[in-house]
Amino acid sequence: MYNRMQFDLITLFPEFFDSPLRYGVVSRALLRGAVTVRTHDLRGYTSDRHQTTDDRPYGGGEGMVMKIEPLYRALADIAGAPERTLRAGAPDPAHVVLLSAQGRLFDQAMARRLAGHRQLVLICGRYEGVDERVAEHLADEEISIGNFVLTGGELAAAVLLDAVARLLPGVLGDAQSALNESFSLPDSSAAAPLDCPHFTRPPEFNGWPVPPVLLQGDHQAIRDWRARAAWDKTRRLRPDLCPASPDE
Ligand code: ADE
């Protein structure tokens, strides 16, 4: 991993990112220089008077499609080379991600992999989609943050940036280490994939008690309870993450 990571966000709405970058762990990572973020207004890379970034789809149909030329120019400027094959030869090439609902599903393993790059360039699509030649020839990969459709890639880029930035060296303090949390254990681990439930004071609120074992100071009993509670909750809310039992 590099000691600092550069994010470049290509968007039609650069101000969109003002607020997600202003709070908590991400803002501290920016202040400390562990992360730098630049936003790039796609309209600045258009060449016509109207600053056109979209056009009607070939073959007809609803909606508009984002044009390739402004994105090509933006990547030439930001990523060193616009084309995937041209970047491939560079020593530490920028990694270019297109955010779209058609992409590969984002998860913690992907966040860990992306955290190894020196520079991540995130292309935020708008309208009905992006000219497919961007995915075919310019982007290194196409990522979706979930099986739902957003109005644009900006929220998805903010989610990806947050999940990656917190994994970078020195961004989380020891007290908040990213080691013992949901989705962070190897598949071979006997522990549940999701973190266990947490409680804090008061010991009873509104007639709802904290599990007594957590108040009694028996550390082995607490570890056992947490392991069981994590599996119970995973089975209840995320059965898809549980190994199939032998009779299934
Ligand atoms: N753009 C629209 N929907 C999206 C999604 N689910 N993930 C990433 N980008 C998107």
Image: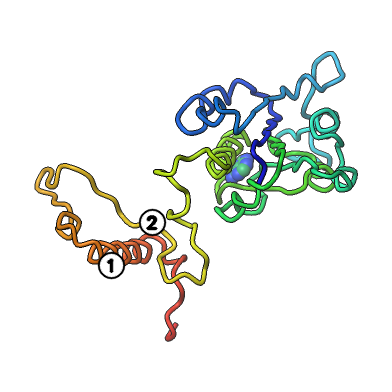
Where 78 sits versus 134, above or below?
Answer: above
Q: Which mark is residue 224?
A: 1
- Quadrant for residue 3, please give it: top right
* Relative to 159, 37 lies left or right: right
N-terminal label among 2 and 1: 2
Residue 42: percent from the left, percent from the top?
A: 75, 25
Of residues 67 and 194, the one drawn nearer to the viewer in this rendering: 194
Using the image, determine if residue 4 lies above or below residue 230: above
Q: Residue shown at 70%/31% (left/top)? A: 8
Q: How far from the left and from the top, in percent, is residue 11?
A: 69, 28
How far from the left and from the top, in percent, is residue 182?
44, 55
The amino acid beneath tag 1 is Asp
Q: Which residue is mark 2?
A: 195
Observer-nearest of 127 and 11: 11
| Distance between the alpha carbons at the discs numbered 2 and 1 | 13 Å
Q: Residue at x 81, y 22 (%)?
A: 45
Q: Give left or right: position of 144 versus 170.
A: right
Query: Looking at this rendering, what residue extends furthest in the top direction?
Result: 49
Which image quadrant for residue 217?
Answer: bottom left
Q: Which residue occupies the foreground of this view, 31 or 119?
A: 31
Q: Residue at x 55, y 47 (%)?
A: 148
Mark toward the viewer: 2 or 1: 1
Q: Secondary structure at mark 2?
A: loop
192 to 67, vertically: above or below: below
Mark 2 and mark 1 residues within 8 Å of each other at the beta carbon: no
Q: Quadrant of ligand 1?
A: top right
User: Given the image, on which type of amino acid does mark 2 rest?
Assistant: Asp
